[in-house]
Image (cartoon, rainbow, N blue to C red):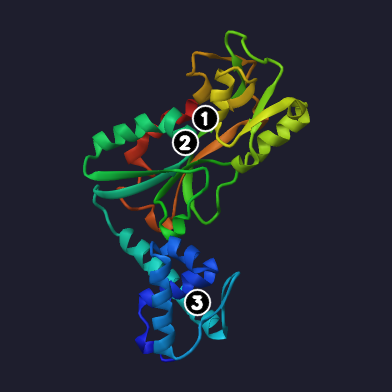
Amino acid sequence: MNEQHLGWDDLRVALAIAEAGSLSGAGRRLGLSHATLFRRLNAIERRLGVRLFERARTGYSPTAAGEELAATAARVEAEVLRAERRLVGRDLRLSGTVRVTTTDTLLMGLLSPILADFRRAHPDIVLEVAVSNQLFNLSQRDADVAVRPSSSPPEHLVGRRVGSIAQAIYARADGAGDAAAWIGPDRHLGYAPLEAWMADKGADAHCRYRVDTLLGMLAAVRDGLGRAVLPCYLADAEPSLTRLGEPIPELATELWLLTHPDLRRVARIPMKEPLREVGALKVIK
């Protein structure tokens, strides 16, 4: 293999196609069109004089040469990301960009005013907020900081527990709607503890409405579709809802502020002093 003609962009193309199994999937990862990737792959194969992928209706399968090149690309990518994290970790200035990922409910119910205070206190820092119920890959710099509810945060990340989220049963305050019905999480929400609790309490048998966001569950309770278990920090602020009983101990969830180990000493990454306001989350009830 005449590797002296290979550039980093060539390696990225080969790796993306190998991992995605198609040009369209690789294009989404790289932000390139199907036609552009097709031309790039053909050009790489011509320069190397070897076929890297077998084309079929079901997708692109790497040949032995393609597998070797993709493995090389994966090693190079890992080294590039490690170098990037180490270099970013030397930045001691309170400036630059911080990308934060969190859930829609935490942003709406808790974090938005905290992030606003942080921006006012540090005007040279640009905040980017990615709202998702999936934990982004902090090793690949999809985000710098994650604020997540978790009973067992990933071991390869560093962080601190900043609170405990209490949860309780809520219903519409005026009693309107179907008080006997339950609203539950859709399977795509990935809320296994609540699903298990509802099954154990018999609530699952009376659940006729499921939704894949907690904000959607709150809206359903507000609109009279039944009762639901909701985070207290979110539902207590909704005047049309009433809490039925005390918080459920077995559904209490720890709240974590997480980052990659290489970024924990970067001044603009708010793991300590810059987000001292997060301490208020310790009294979530």
Is residue 93 visible to the viewer in this orientation of the structure?
yes
Q: In the drawing, does residue 59 fall left or right of residue 199?
A: left
Is residue 166 visible to the viewer in this orientation of the structure?
no
Q: Residue at x 64, y 15 (%)?
A: 244
Image quadrant assignment for residue 140: bottom left
Gap between marks 1 and 3 measured at Cα: 41 Å
Report helix, strand or loop for mark 3: helix
Which one is nearer the viewer's eye here, 217 or 36? 36
Label 3 sits on what residue type? Ala
Report helix, strand or loop for mark 2: helix
* Mark 3 vs 2, N-terminal side: 3
| Circles 1, 3 touching at the beta carbon (< 8 Å) | no
Residue 104: image tag = 2
Q: In the drawing, does residue 119 fall left or right of residue 55?
A: left
Label 1 sits on what residue type? Leu
Residue 70: image tag = 3
| Circles 1, 2 touching at the beta carbon (< 8 Å) | yes
Label 2 sits on what residue type? Asp
* Mark 1 vs 2, N-terminal side: 2
The image shows residue 58, relative to residue 133, as above or below, that is: below
Gap between marks 1 and 2 measured at Cα: 8 Å
Gap between marks 3 and 2 measured at Cα: 36 Å
Q: Residue at x 42, y 81 (%)?
A: 42
Image quadrant assignment for residue 218: top right
